Image (spheres, helix red, strand yellow):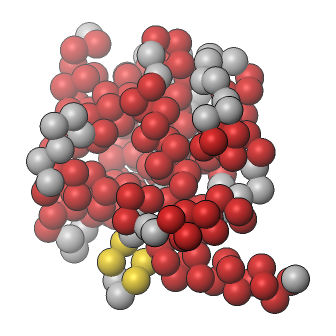
Amino acid sequence: MKSFLISLIATIVFSISVNGQTKFWEDLSCSQKTDIVRVCQSESVKKFYDGDFVLSDDEKTEKLLNELVTSNDTILPLSFYLFNKISIESDGALSEMAGEYYIEFLARHPKYILSYFTKERELSINKPLWRNYAQSVGYELYFKKKGTSDIKYNYQSFKEILIASSKGNKENEETFRIFWQLVDETIKNMD
């Protein structure tokens, strides 16, 4: 059983990046998705994926967000897919609560997420997710500056994480520039 699990995890990790190409949830086969869900340890993550979890601005949702942020790289495509789903579905109080988790998730996986945002740009997605993230980041960094957010990153430290992770990839550098422009606009509009 232990050797099967190790083999399964190795297969999943390999499927996330094949020949230097980053793979996202949408790029995975049904069997790859099933394997990732199978190794996921979090019941709340599995319930949310299965549609058996109602998002709200409560402790259960906060626990879900924390589990998505702290999940291991084996389930990264699933975690990011679910963060995207939350980004689309969230409103009002839930959006406010989720902002700090978006920042932490971006800080932990900047290359992966910037690559996804670059893919959105290249495909000219009508309602790109990077806009949701940029606005949430802008709000959270604004509140950090005002002293009402306890996120561990300030404007400059978070920006430096994204700059460093986009260096050397022209497409991601351009995505970062556009993303950060919207972060700045969001902060400016808050004043």
Q: Do we see residue 29 in this rendering?
A: yes
Residue at 23 percent across and 58 percent down: it is 119
State left or right for residue 37 relative to residue 105.
right
Q: Do we see residue 134 in this rendering?
A: no
Q: How many numbered tags mark residues here?
A: 0
Looking at the rendered image, the quarter that the N terminus falls into is bottom right
Residue lying farthest right?
1
Residue at 65 percent across and 59 percent down: it is 37
Residue at 43 percent across and 41 percent down: it is 84
Q: Say which quarter of the image contains residue 44.
A: top right
| In the foreground, 152 or 95 | 95
State left or right for residue 138 relative to residue 92.
left
Q: Say which quarter of the image contains residue 165.
A: bottom left
Picture coordinates of residue 71 (x, y %)? 65, 55
Picture coordinates of residue 120 (x, y %)? 22, 51
Picture coordinates of residue 109 (x, y %)? 47, 58
| In the foreground, 130 or 173 | 130
Picture coordinates of residue 62 (x, y %)? 67, 29
Residue at 60 percent across and 43 percent down: it is 49
Looking at the rendered image, the quarter that the C terminus falls into is top left
| In the foreground, 187 or 169 | 169
In the displayed structure, 151 sits above or below 104; it is above
State left or right for residue 16 relative to residue 9.
left
In the displayed structure, 158 sits above or below 38; it is above
In the displayed structure, 97 sits above or below 5; it is above
In the displayed structure, 158 sits above or below 96; it is below
